[in-house]
Image (cartoon, rainbow, N blue to C red):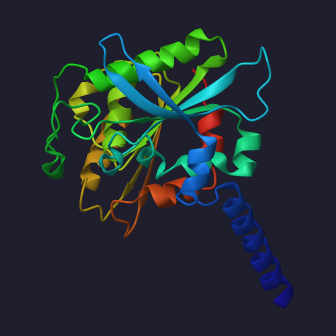
Amino acid sequence: MKKTIFAVMAALFLQIGSSVFAQQPFDSAVGLQQEIYAKNTFVSSLGDTLLYRSLAPLNQKTGKKYPLVLFMHGAGERGNDNEKQLTHGAQLFLNPYNRDRYPAFVIFPQCPENAFWSYSQTPRYQDGIMPSQFQETPEITAVMELLRKYVASGQVDTKRIYVMGLSMGGMATFDLAIRYPDFFAAAVPICGAVDVSRFTQKPSIKFRIFHGDSDPTVPVACSRAAYRRLTELGAKVAYTEFPGVGHPSYHPAFSTPDFLSWLFRQHR
């Protein structure tokens, strides 16, 4: 009996240890992030300036194509410093284990202070009412033109382009997946929201949705509704809800043991 208990405890220790090593500190070492993520500026065809940070594949090889990850930040990271967008999620891709195992281009654009990624004004997501019909914003246009520039370089595996985001960025993740269903292989909206009527047919994109059930900012009902609608359409979608977790559900999401392994397995 004692041997059995010891074996179980040892197995749990190894499992926890490996997952911590694989998904290490998500939001720390901001200074280090700013040194490694290149600081860039992109001007769209509309004349709008998009600030962004980028990470190149580790030990990038000439002639090889790599996945590309687009990370859409939340409302709190808006601005014009080209730094705050690295607050959440950037360290995930700098983890030595992750960077070695999942070499990829990673892009962190920054939304201007008074903009809202996919909406011309802040939507009423607190009561679950999201705009259903609207034009693409200049910010999303700039982001897509930047991604196409990367694709045109010939260094991106076009079957492995991913989008993820949190809060306002989670909403943008849904928006991008709906507007460009043949561009992305997978979408990971975290504590996001969307008008589910925009999903009119089975999407080819794979979805993985995360939300905290005690979120006071973006109601968990938003992600539940999206999951139900996508399931009804027969989409490939997984949903994880964290009990007792508020708005920062990105913390446990990033710590999910297969968070990155799932993402990089997806192909279009």
| Residue 10 appears left or right of 53 | right
Tell me if residue 217 comes above or below residue 56 in the rendering.
Answer: below
| Residue 82 appears left or right of 91 | left
- Residue 259 makes an appearance in the image: no
Q: Residue at x 32, y 42 (%)?
A: 79
Looking at the figure, which quarter contains the C terminus? Answer: top right
Looking at the figure, which quarter contains the N terminus? Answer: bottom right
Q: Residue at x 65, y 47 (%)?
A: 94
| Residue 87 appears left or right of 114 | right
Tell me if residue 190 comes above or below residue 235 in the rendering.
Answer: below
Where residue 78 sits in the image (x, y, percent)?
Answer: 32, 43
Q: Residue at x 43, y 40 (%)?
A: 82
* Frontmost residue, 267 versus 120: 120
Count of residue discs = 0
Q: Residue furthest bottom?
A: 2
Tell me if residue 142 comes above or below residue 45 in the rendering.
Answer: below
- Residue 238 makes an appearance in the image: yes
Where residue 227 sits in the image (x, y, percent)?
Answer: 35, 42
* Frontmost residue, 168 versus 203: 168
Answer with the quarter of the image where residue 245 lies: bottom left
Where residue 202 sits in the image (x, y, percent)?
Answer: 39, 23
Where residue 242 sits in the image (x, y, percent)?
Answer: 42, 62
Tell me if residue 49 comes above or below residue 154 in the rendering.
Answer: below
* Frontmost residue, 67 versus 221: 67
Answer with the quarter of the image where residue 8 lies: bottom right
